[in-house]
Amino acid sequence: MISKKFRIFPHSVYAETCEKIENQRVNMMRSYITALLFVVFASSMSAQQDPQFTQWYMDHVVSNIAAAGQSDLTNINGFYRNQWNGLDRSPVTSLLNVDGQVGFIPGAFGIQFYQDELGYESNTMMKLGYAYTLSPFANGTKMSLGMSVSYFSKSFATEWISIDPWASDQAIPQNDNQSSAVDVDLGIYISKPKTFYAGLSMTHLAETEFTEMSITPSRHLYAMGGYNYPLDGDALVLRTNILAKTDLNASAIDMNVNVLYNEMIWAGVSWRPGDAIAPIVGFQYKMIDKDATNYKEQLFRLGYSFDVTTSELQSFSSGSHEIFLSYSFKFESTPILNRYANPRIL
């Protein structure tokens, strides 16, 4: 594959500033993130080891556990991606992610199940994570730290297809092969609700080897950021998102712009230089029901994207389909307090 280099200059994201010490700390953190983004963006764009989702911005917890519990809702998010449609045994990826505030202890939890099928290779991952949010800064900005532990299983089937005989090559497994490992992810995330966000995270921090296969996953570094621009109050909002990822050998970037109308319908486009351009549409619906003793809030979201392949694979694949489905909820009950009094002393 021909390597192509792109020079991309990031657009800095700024929030309200003041002379208070808390805001100076926020500006310093954002400066570090902007510097890292510039370094990553200047790298050549090529293939990425970890699987990718075009609608990643709908669930930041997928690549940064520190983003867990940012809303007061419990979120159940699912992704299904059929990549490079038309290729034989093309990648198929499914992911289920749950996050929310714990309640009885400070912080939030994150649980993730991931399944990826690529040819005769199968990858399964389960993660359990925790995120702790520091006290908000003066302007409402929040900072969170997170860590997750993952169980990663990889297997290969031995239905090899080759032009030359492969059975005599001892480097090629003769039997089905399976191995597993335990690893650690770390993340930091800052955000101001409905305004901006930025985050840094690293996966496969321990680089635990699959001993039966002599394979060691590489550490992956993710940098994300986004800003919302109100075009017509809350009725029309322009949302920008950017994600850069690298294993220090290969790097990739994903840029997205979409418009949310009346907090119900969104449409936009994503672009991965050297890979694909993807139109995106989505719909969400919120229901709130409350009375004297109960409060119920539910949010349903559905998104679809189609990646139009722009790389050399366009001669073999028409593109990639991806579906995002989400259900978020919050149920609260206020107990009725019975009061007793003596009518003689009312």
Image (cartoon, helix red, strand yellow):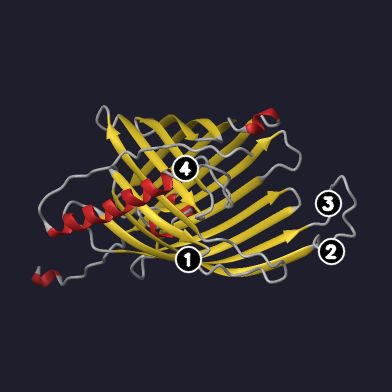
**Residue behind mark 1:** 148
The quadrant of the rendering that contains the N terminus is: top right
Q: Is 285 situated above or below 330?
A: above
Q: Is residue 22 left or right of residue 208?
A: left
Q: Is residue 26 left or right of residue 121?
A: left
Do tag 4 and tag 2 residues touch (Cβ < 8 Å)? no
Q: CA distance from mark 3 to mark 4?
A: 33 Å
Label 4 neighbourhood size at 10 Å, few (<14), some (14-19), many (20+)? many
Residue 189 % position (x, y):
35, 56
Q: CA distance from mark 1 to mark 2?
A: 37 Å
Label 3 neighbourhood size at 10 Å, few (<14), some (14-19), many (20+)? some
| For marks 3 and 4 on the same chain, the one whose residue lies earlier in the sequence | 3
How many callouts does the rendering have? 4
Q: Nearer the viewer, residue 6 or 295?
A: 6
Q: Amino acid at mark 1?
A: Ser
Q: Amino acid at mark 2?
A: Gln
**Residue behind mark 4:** 253
| For marks 2 and 3 on the same chain, the one whose residue lies earlier in the sequence | 3
**Residue name at image x 27 percent, y 56 percent:** 29
Task: Give the quadrant of residue 41.
Answer: top left
Q: Indicate the secondary structure of the residue bearing disc 1.
A: strand
- Which label sits in the foreground, 4 or 2? 2
Q: Nearer the viewer, residue 66 or 275?
A: 275
Do tag 1 and tag 2 residues touch (Cβ < 8 Å)? no
**Residue behind mark 2:** 170
